[in-house]
Image (cartoon, grey):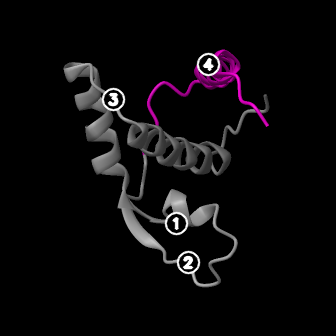
Amino acid sequence: MKINIDEIEVFLKIIIEKAKMNGFTKIEINNDFYWWLPTEESFDFNNSNPQLVVGSLYDDYNSLKKMIVDNVSTPLDLERLAHLMLALTYEISSSDNPFIC
C-alpha cells in the first residue's frame, strides 16, 4: 500500500471543515492520559506480549504547539497528532452533536 500525502492533507481538511461547520471550533478534552501501544510494537505481530505505555494529550498538544513556534518537526509529531485526533474522535462522537461526514 502506498499512501499519498496530498490525499491525507485533503482528508484532514474535509474532516476539519465538517467539524467547524457543526460548531466544533474548540473541543474540551476531559482526559489527559491515554494508553498507547508504541508504533514499533503495533506492527509486530510476532510479539505475543506487546507493552502498553501511558501517554499525555497535554504533552502531545504542547509539543505540537512548540513545533509551530520552532518550525521543526519529527516523525514523532505524527504520533502526537494521531493521539489528539483519537481524543477528538472520542469527544465529538460522544457529544450531543456528532457529525456525519
Residue farthest toward the bottom in the current orientation of the protein: 49
How many numbered circles are shown?
A: 4
Q: Earlier in the sequence, mark 4 or mark 3?
A: 4
Query: What separation in Å lies between label 3 and label 2 (alpha carbons)?
Result: 27 Å
Image coordinates of residue 17 in percent, x first then y, are: 62, 17
* Image quadrant assignment for residue 42: bottom right
Type of amino acid at the residue the image marks with label 3: Ser
* Residue 9: assigned label: 4
Which-is-in-front pick, marks 4 and 3? 3
Q: Which residue is mark 1?
A: 37
Image coordinates of residue 95 in percent, x first then y, are: 62, 46
Query: What separation in Å lies between label 1 and label 4 (alpha carbons)?
Result: 25 Å
Residue farthest toward the front in the current orientation of the protein: 46
Type of amino acid at the residue the image marks with label 2: Pro
- State the predominant SS element of the stretch in magenta: helix
In-front residue for pair 32/26 = 32
Query: What separation in Å lies between label 4 and label 2 (alpha carbons)?
Result: 31 Å
Image coordinates of residue 76 in percent, x first then y, are: 40, 43
Q: Which residue is mark 2?
A: 50
| Residue at x 27%, y 39% (from the top left corner) | 63
* Region rendered in magenta: 1-28
- Which quarter of the image is occupied by the N terminus? top right
Q: Which residue is mark 3?
A: 73
Is residue 68 located in the magenta-colored stretch of the structure?
no
Compared with residue 73, is residue 75 higher up or lower down, i.e. above or below?
below
Q: Secondary structure at mark 2?
A: loop
In-front residue for pair 76/15 = 76
Question: Are circles 4 and 2 on residues that touch, CB within 8 Å?
Answer: no
Q: Earlier in the sequence, mark 1 or mark 2?
A: 1
Q: Earlier in the sequence, mark 3 or mark 1?
A: 1
Compared with residue 88, is residue 4 higher up or lower down, i.e. above or below?
above
